[in-house]
Amino acid sequence: MRWSWRKNLIKLGMIMGKKLTQVSFLFVFATLLVVIGHADITLDYRDLWIYKWVYSFHMPLFFFLSGFLFAYTYPANKMQGMRFFPFMRKKVKRLLLPFLFINSVIFVIKSRFVPAELMQNPLTFSFSSWVESMLWYPIGFMWFLPTLFMIFVFFSLLRKWIYVNVYLQMGG
């Protein structure tokens, strides 16, 4: 008998309808940690234990949750037949297009209305500055989306490489 994510999670009481209750809780918890981490309540906030504690794990928690939901949404049998380029096209739509749109809107606002001396990475309203901001200086909270996309690319290629090598070594 094959092991099933969904059946075992239902047995553990982790699924109510189509929602994973513990994962929902962890997303709320991780989001709260991001808010706490970015609060900067006092001038010495970065020296406080709470800041150091939050920054020790809140982003790895988001990546773990993304990976867990990916494995839950795309079980191994579904991944076997999935081709690389259609999968990447889907990830571009879900991760990179929102990144490009939101980053572009904020780029226009910052480059037109915010004085350069107030910016950590000053921008000019030019194509080269836009490209630079997309590649090297994304808007603070937006770095997560292209990073997650690159992880999907890396692990998709790694999975393909492992599958091909194991298949060839087994005489396939």
Image: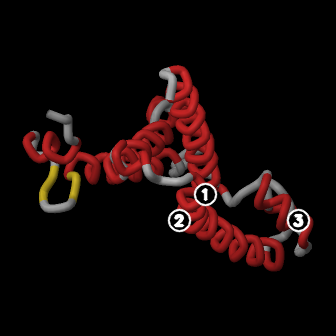
Q: What kind of residue is marked 3?
A: Ser
Q: Is residue 130 left or right of residue 101?
A: right
Query: Pointer 2: what residue?
Result: 94
Question: Is disc 3 placed on a helix, strand or loop?
Answer: helix
Residue underneath mark 3:
129
Indicate the position of residue 133 as horizontal and vertical percent values: 80, 60
Give the vertical position of 85 relative to 153 (above or below): below
Q: CA distance from mark 3 to mark 2?
A: 25 Å
Mark 2: give few (<14), some (14-19) or many (20+) Cα within 10 Å. Answer: few
Q: Which residue is mark 1?
A: 85
Most foreground residue, 101 or 49: 101
Label 1 environment density (alpha carbons within 10 Å; few <14, some 14–19, many ≥20): few
Do the CB atoms of the residues marked 3 and 1 lie less than 8 Å apart? no
**With 137 as the anchor, is 40 left or right in this view?**
left
Q: Nearer the viewer, residue 16 or 4?
A: 4
Q: If you read the primary sequence from the N terminus, does the residue marked by circle 3 or circle 2 appear first?
A: 2
Residue 97 falls in which quadrant of the image?
A: bottom right
Residue depicted at 85% across the width and 58% down the height = 132
Of marks 2 and 1, which one's residue comes earlier in the chain? 1
Is the C-beta separation of discs 2 and 1 under 8 Å? Answer: no
* Location of residue 151 in the rendering, given as x and y in whole percent from the top left corner: 58, 43
**Residue 73 as seen in the image, left or right of residue 67:** left
